[in-house]
Amino acid sequence: MPSELGPCAALETLIAAAADVCSKPYQHAVLSAEEATPEDYQGRIECRNGEGERLRELDLELEMYRSGVELNLTLAWADQPDRPMLWHGQHPVWMDGESGKRCSSPADGAPLEALARRLRALLA
């Protein structure tokens, strides 16, 4: 029987907690896409400052999926297609948000790489 909170509720809580640790001092909430499942997850990580004000420019889109036994994920700044996105499988790869070509890590990319590593460690 499905939970009243939905099949991804526990996963959302875990993702939000990981984002809180990797992007201090911000607080995060996670909203799953309607079609998301724990096995093929899509969602949005929303960011707030210490006073509870939304920081939309720091919101992230997250997609997680398995390829064989490997957990792969992508993280991108929501609604900012011109920013690079991170694909993380066995190692991190930054890609240009518009062309999809490999690029260098942005100056503010370290928290995303930390979040990707943490999620892979927690969910592998």
Image (cartoon, rainbow, N blue to C red):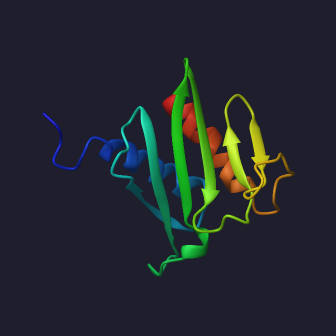
| Residue 42 spot, x, y in % from top left | 46, 47
The picture quadrant where one finds residue 3 is top left
Q: In this rendering, would 119 be left or right of 96?
A: left
Quarter of the picture containing the N terminus is: top left
Question: What residue is shown at x 77% (from left), y 41% (from top)?
Answer: 93
Does 29 sit above or below residue 121? below
Does 81 sit above or below residue 33? below
Does 71 sit above or below residue 34? above
Does 37 sit above or below residue 12? above
Which of the two residues, 41 or 55, is positioned nearer the viewer here? 41
Question: What residue is shown at x 74% (from left), y 58% (from top)?
Answer: 98
| Residue 25 spot, x, y in % from top left | 58, 68
Furthest residue in direction left, as rendered: 1
Q: In this rendering, would 111 be left or right of 54?
A: right
Question: What residue is shown at x 70% (from left), y 48% (from top)?
Answer: 86
| Residue 10 spot, x, y in % from top left | 33, 43
Question: What residue is shown at x 65% (from left), y 68% (from top)?
Answer: 80
Q: In this rendering, would 91 be left or right of 25?
A: right
Q: How many marks?
A: 0
